[in-house]
Amino acid sequence: MATKAKQPEAEQTNAGQPAEDTAEQGGAKDTVQAGKASEAGAAAKKDGTAPSGAAKKDGAAKDGAGKDGAAKGQAVKSTEEHAFQAEMQQLLHIIVHSLYSEREIFLRELISNASDALNKLRFLTLTQPDVRDPEVELEITLEVDEGGEDDGTKAIIVSDTGIGMTHDELIESLGTIARSGTLDFVKQLSGIDPGKRTEMIGQFGVGFYSVFMVTGRVIVDTCPADPAEPAWRWISDGGGGYSLEPSDRTARGTSVRVELREDAAEFAQAYRVETVVKRYSNFVPHPVRLDGRQLNSQEAIWSLPKAEVTQEQYTEFYKYLTHGIDEPQHTIHLSIDAPVQYRALLFVPKQLTNEMLYSRTGWGLKLYANRVFIQDDCQELMPLYLRFLQGVLDSEDLPLNVSREMVQQNPLLAKISASLTGRVLRELKALSEGNAERYATFFREYGKVLKEGITADRPNQERLLELARYNSSVCSDEKDLTTLKEYVSRMRDDQQEIFYFSGPSRDAIERNPSLEFFRKRGLEVLYFYDQVDDFVMAQLQEYDGKKFASIDQADLETLKDAAEVTAGDQPALEGDALDKLIGYVKETLGERVADVIASKRLVESPAVLVNPDGQAASISKMMRLIDQSFAAPQKILEINPGHSLVRNLSALLQTEPEEPLVREITEQMFENCLLVEGMIDRPEKMVTRIQALMERAAELRVAAIEDAPVGDTEEEPPTADA
């Protein structure tokens, strides 16, 4: 077993003596308590230990402080009593009672430490082949002791065949939990809000001490890999100190016996232990066995080179990860060594769910540190606009807090997030260039989420604009996509604006009167179907030096010098007749419109509403959905002087200004425009008016038929689709 604790600046005290006295005497003082040897010896189980007594080989022992060291051949003392420093006791209390929210974490910590010990041994054998028990398999063994009739104490034992610890290493690793500045650190820690303590404690490797959440006593037997070093036993109840005594353990490695309190007896049950292992330690790179069964069965394929992983393995891992049956749409496998080391295996699901689209929680990657599970849904690893990604990230460099339940907010984490985001965007760009059809499938599903980053992630804005795809008036159908770069390449020489329009579908946009001028002139218009697009355009404003402009804006540069574009052979209304009609319509509609003007953009429709302030109509509609009391800004009504309805309305106004039909047609023409915009307030009122107009039209038609000479024929009235 290996831990990550550091030696404090002050010397370890013995038998409760002050550190100053210990330093003056040049070493730790030991207290012989032979009676404890038999007590601790009874605790050893199935790990190669016997009741403590003789030391290995020359019987040498080092002094309690571990600084000067005793000469080989010196008599071994039976038991050494070491007192924790006062500030260390305070910190231990905080660890046990404040830092950990899940008691089961203690088992993850012990397995993680055991894995570290195995890794250290494997590294040691590369340079020092002369180790104890070189043929023994590197493994972690778990045992549960449900307590016998004579001794009802329940326990769990975590053993490894790793590097083990010497006398001095036990003191350094298990006898101290902080480096220099411990006293100041504990004072700070004790004076702050418990919820913020995890932000400060990340530099202290004290995961081992989580055992005191569940134990009344812990016994550590350890035998170093160095054949010349004897075995030792460390015992503590988490109170004022710990004891050290020789151990007769002969097998290389470490065994930690955790004697469970009554309220933690569940951890002496095999099924409970198996559940914890599978959740937290399923990808530990060494076998974790319980009753001869290996529990960590899933291979950490993210740690393998991409060339060694098959598509079937990726698919099976994705199903394991998501508990689903579908295959992923796309897989991203990364292995990064600089500026920070991490490995990541990410998946794009086949479909974008409402949970992915609208949820601001419940997303994020699974975080591992050296294959040990740390956190579900770690949102600090990637930006919100990549929330559709599922997968894992494993880093050996990432510093974690003491409980490994929250990632410390530090520059390294920010570096991982920045690097991961950049690599994902690079992978998506490679996909777009290498397989345009496959990327189009991805973007049609996830583009509405990815485009959120255009304004949210300014450092990657250019990258995201390159990845953005849009439908447009030159596309063959609504599935066909184009890029902003391609749009600009098709612009006319005198065109200064990138035109776009928002709507629920391609069909709805192409039926909107605002598009008529651009279709007639052959000017390309981008079609926006996603609500995020209007917000992006409002903030982005331009691309490649070209301004974005919604075609329903009143002050389009393209329209300033344009002549009216009319359909048919009839002359457009103009002069006093046009001015009189505009005045009448403006008076009739009153404050419901900002203005009434003659249109240069309409070809086939009699009227259209446009925005005087440049705000897209879709934003107003969305605001109305959020707040029904939202009052949309007044729009400008443009009427088409060349349309037959407008000319006939003007004629009626000239000949019969008091005719109710003139007002009804004016109101209906306006509400038709509101209907197209999706902004109609009282549809029932409009229905009543339409019915009255239909009755009037039917009466006029009947009268015309009765007055017509026999044999006269007339053209069929146009259909609704005409």
Image: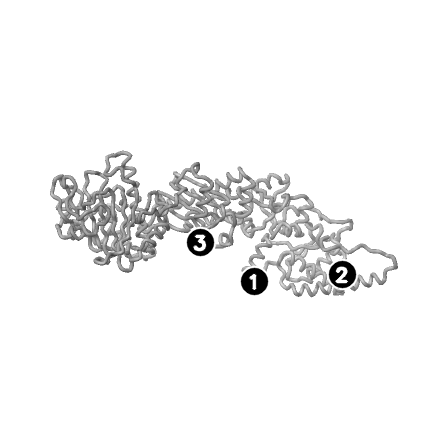
User: In the image, what residue type sits under mark 1?
Assistant: Gln
Q: Which one is nearer the viewer's eye here, 661 or 27?
A: 27
Mark 2 is surrounded, within 10 Å at the Cα level, by few (under 14), some (14 to 19) or many (20 or more) other residues, namely some
In the picture of the structure, the residue carrying the numbered disc 3 is: 362
Please give the residue where the numbered disc 1 appears in the rendered image: 628
The residue positioned farthest toward the right in the image shown = 710
Left or right side of 706 for 508 = left
Read off the residue under disc 2: 653
Q: Earlier in the sequence, mark 2 or mark 1?
A: 1
Give me the C-alpha separation between circle 2 and circle 1: 37 Å
Q: Nearer the viewer, residue 308 or 362?
A: 308
Q: Amino acid at mark 2?
A: Leu
Q: Amino acid at mark 3?
A: Gly
Which element is circle 2 on?
helix
Callout 1 touching callout 3 (CB < 8 Å): no
Q: Residues within 10 Å of mark 3 (few under 14, many from 20)?
A: few
Which of discs 1 and 3 lies nearer the camera? The answer is 3
The front one of 662 and 657 is 662
Colouring mode (rainbow / by chain / secondary structure / one colour): one colour
Residue 99 visible in rendering: no
Q: Earlier in the sequence, mark 2 or mark 3?
A: 3
Q: Position of residue 416 (x, y in %)?
A: 40, 44
Let me know if residue 622 appears in the view: yes
Q: Earlier in the sequence, mark 1 or mark 3?
A: 3
Q: CA distance from mark 2 to mark 3?
A: 63 Å
